[in-house]
Image: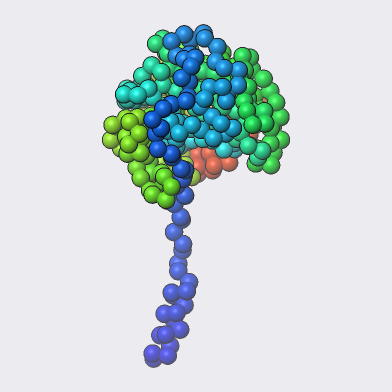
Amino acid sequence: MHRLLIPLLLFLVACPEEDEPDPVDLPCFEQEPEPAERSCFTAPEPFFDPDEPLPEHLSETGCFTGSTAAPELVRYEVASPLWTDGSGKRRWLMLPRGGEATDRGERWDLPVGSVVFKEFAGDDGPIETRVLLRTPTGWRADTYRWEGDDAILLSEPETHPAEVDGRSLDWLFPGRAECGYCHGSPPVLLGPTTQQLSRDVCIGEEVVPQLDHLADRGVTDLPTGDGLPDPADATAPIEGRARAWLHANCSHCHRPGGWTPPELTMDLRFDTPFEQTRTCEVDVQYWVGPTEDAVRIRAGDREASHLFLRLTPGDRGSMPPLGTSIPDPRGLEVVGAWIDSLESCP
């Protein structure tokens, strides 16, 4: 009898029923200690005049040497990133000494003199660096285009070829006016929010709550809250992953008061209860291609759900309309799987 049991036990150990999905890898980066003296935007200071032109080259701001950020810039990561044709991204912020971020609900408010940077990178290195500066009258947005080891300030939108993940793209660099399409006019800060920053990161080899890291650098004393799920985290529930993706990629426009026609009713914010998003079995409000019985979400059927179809190329008018030309495979995967999992509308 024992001789029969031993092979069976070995079989069960060697062949588990099903592997559990692995969580996503944490973003890891090095963060140098804050220096005694700062070099980033010390002179001239552009913060007090929204129309004061920035230096022609990014290196002249003192904030970057090549693509290396000055040590006073504090690196951060978001939980649910915006898709931009698969480009790699790095993000930094810098506050004036003694200034702290304040949570205004859906937005962070940073003191005058704060700077936020976002870098987009392709196969050959950085492509674009966007700069948001907090002035007394609000935020101003500027764009630098990388050429070799430095980046050049743009005054108008430009399109240049770029290689991203093995694909050749016509990369659109926004001018100051185009930044307002997403950030509003006057611009508002979108990325840094308590929801987006309430996540773990690893600094060097140490895993820490990101808001603790930001507190150590004097950015904020806000406690870690309920963060957005990571859409790439296969261990998280599919509804949270899908709605976090929609929040990051769509809700800055599709919300009350967002950059949409005033009569548009859809609300894709993560915290809006699903039954109040006006999506499930709700008729579309605008023409999106030849169709009958068009609804935003049809429970259990992604191919009959125009919210899903608008994320794919076609004559319906792909979304989002700016900042990307290629659908996000992960966005399609998680949003489609969530819609298919719905048995009914709430």
Residue 89 image-quadrant placement? top right
Residue lying furthest front: 36
- Residue 22 makes an appearance in the image: yes
Q: Quadrant of residue 194?
A: top left
Position of residue 307 relative to residue 259, above or below, is below
The relative height of residue 57 versus residue 90 in the rendered view (above or below) is: above
124, 233: nearer the viewer: 124
Of the pair 330 and 225, the residue shown nearer to us: 225
Q: Quadrant of residue 176?
A: top right
Q: Is residue 70 above or below residue 53?
A: below
Q: Viewer-proximal residue, 85 or 268?
A: 85
Residue 295 location (% of width, % of height): 51, 29
Left or right: where does residue 254 sit relative to residue 67? left
Circle count? 0
At 35% from the left and 29% from the top, the residue drawn is: 219
Task: Please provide percent x and percent y for residue 80.
Answer: 45, 37
Residues 190 and 109: in front is 109
- Which residue lies at the image location 41% right of the left edge and 21% below the top edge? 114
**In this image, 190 relative to 98: left or right?**
right
* Residue at image coords 46%, 55%: 22
- Residue at figure coordinates x 41%, y 45% from the top left: 203
Q: Position of residue 208 (x, y in %)?
A: 35, 45
For the N terminus, give its image quadrant.
bottom left
In this rendering, position of residue 118 left or right of residue 150: left
Does residue 77 lie above or below 264 as drawn? below
Relative image position of residue 57 (x, y in whole percent)? 60, 21
Coloring scheme used: rainbow
Q: Is residue 299 visible from the viewing direction of this image?
A: no
Position of the C terminus, as image quadrant, is: top left
